[in-house]
Image (cartoon, rainbow, N blue to C red):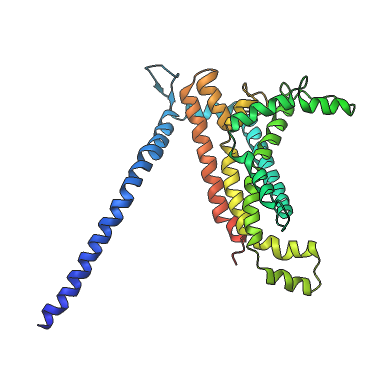
């Protein structure tokens, strides 16, 4: 009797585990299948295409191994494209985080209309990047734009925002930061509202002023929020496309890596293999930057 009673709970437990695993697989397998088909399969296909000399639309492709990579890094194009990508990413990420924190500090007050102000700041983030780019092109137009009219009123000439590469890149950075500023502000605002008030009161009792309280209490407690925003904004900036194609169709000044891949593959030479190589290089950069942030930067994050 004892042997029989000891086996039944084990059998019941094993049967329960089997049911739990079946339920788990029923929920997980469809998602895994979708990810494999629509994410990993195109990814590996793109890596394979990057080893081909293939013109878009052609039925024939010649394997070249790492030839596309050698041509890219041996040419002067690599330095220009990677430099533009780096300047665009550093400028947009830095300005978005800094200005977003400043706006969040301004909104973190119990004032009438605070909710409307928060919605107004966040609104540009949800707008179409292409539509935003087209609207701002009219503002930056050196002849009929609103900005040129303002500059003329104060005795200044409008730069050639559209035809001068340095000014074109500056124009795109300004608009990109304006569009994504609300995202960083709202995330920072949530982080500010989660800062314990008793810590700020204790620092106030110790004689710390507003500036010192911010740098010694608030900013360290915002490090998880800053880390999250740093990861997401870097990934978004490196993959920014719709705003760029709207404001710099020919890639005169804002020819980042992803924009160069589009122009090379679909507009200029229709070199699909070379374009796939550029996309693979961008993917490698994204992976490296993400790993560096997760391994190195996260160590300095203060989780309370």
- Looking at this view, name the residue that lies furthest to the front: 112
Foreground pick, 125 / 269: 125
Residue 143 versus residue 66 in the image, above or below: above
In the picture, residue 225 is in which quadrant?
Answer: bottom right
Q: Position of residue 173 (x, y in %)?
A: 69, 35
Residue 263 versus residue 29 in the image, above or below: above
In the picture, residue 124 is in which quadrant?
Answer: top right
Whether residue 273 is visible here, answered yes or no, is yes
Tell me the quarter of the image containing the N terminus: bottom left
Measuring 60% from the left and 44% from the top, which residue is drawn there? Answer: 234
- Looking at this view, name the residue that lies furthest to the right: 155
* Horizontal side of residue 164 vs 239, given as left or right: right
The total number of labels drawn is 0
Foreground pick, 257 / 101: 101
Q: Position of residue 7 (x, y in %)?
A: 15, 75
Q: Position of residue 57 (x, y in %)?
A: 42, 17
Tell me the quarter of the image containing the C terminus: bottom right
Measuring 46% from the left and 30% from the top, which residue is drawn there? Answer: 66
Whether residue 156 is visible here, answered yes or no, is no
Residue 237 versus residue 29 in the image, above or below: above
* Horizontal side of residue 19 vs 178, given as left or right: left
- Looking at this view, name the residue that lies furthest to the bottom: 2
Q: Position of residue 293 (x, y in %)?
A: 57, 52
Measuring 68% from the left and 32% from the top, which residue is drawn there? Answer: 172
Foreground pick, 184 / 127: 127
Foreground pick, 95 / 57: 95
- Looking at this view, name the residue that lies furthest to the left: 1
In the picture, residue 123 is in which quadrant?
Answer: top right
């Amino acid at each position: 009797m004892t042997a029989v009673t000891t086996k039944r709970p084990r059998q019941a437990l094993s049967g329960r585990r089997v049911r739990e695993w079946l339920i788990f697989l029923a929920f997980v397998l469809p998602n895994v299948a979708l990810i494999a088909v629509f994410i990993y399969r195109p990814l590996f296909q793109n890596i394979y295409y990057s080893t081909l000399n293939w013109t878009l639309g052609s039925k024939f492709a010649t394997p070249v191994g790492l030839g596309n990579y050698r041509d890219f890094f041996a040419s002067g194009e690599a330095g220009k494209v990677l430099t533009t990508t780096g300047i665009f990413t550093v400028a947009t990420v830095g300005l978005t985080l800094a200005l977003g924190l400043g706006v969040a500090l301004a909104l973190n007050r119990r004032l009438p209309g605070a909710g409307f102000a928060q919605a107004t700041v966040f609104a540009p983030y949800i707008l179409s990047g292409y539509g935003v780019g087209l609207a701002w092109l009219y503002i930056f137009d050196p002849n009929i734009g609103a900005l040129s009219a303002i500059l003329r009123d104060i005795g200044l000439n409008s730069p050639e925002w559209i035809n001068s590469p340095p000014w074109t890149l500056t124009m795109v950075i300004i608009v990109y930061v304006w569009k994504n500023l609300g995202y960083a502000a709202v995330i920072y605002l949530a982080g500010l509202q989660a800062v314990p008030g008793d810590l700020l009161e204790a620092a106030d009792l110790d004689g710390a002023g507003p500036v010192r309280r911010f740098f010694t209490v608030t900013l360290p407690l915002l490090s998880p929020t800053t880390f999250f925003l740093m990861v997401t904004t870097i990934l978004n900036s490196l993959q920014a496309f719709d705003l760029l194609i709207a404001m710099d169709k020919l890639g005169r000044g804002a020819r980042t890596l992803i924009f160069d891949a589009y122009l090379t593959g679909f507009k200029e030479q229709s070199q699909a293999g070379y374009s796939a190589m550029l996309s693979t290089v961008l993917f490698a950069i994204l992976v490296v930057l993400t790993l560096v942030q997760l391994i190195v930067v996260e160590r300095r994050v203060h989780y309370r």
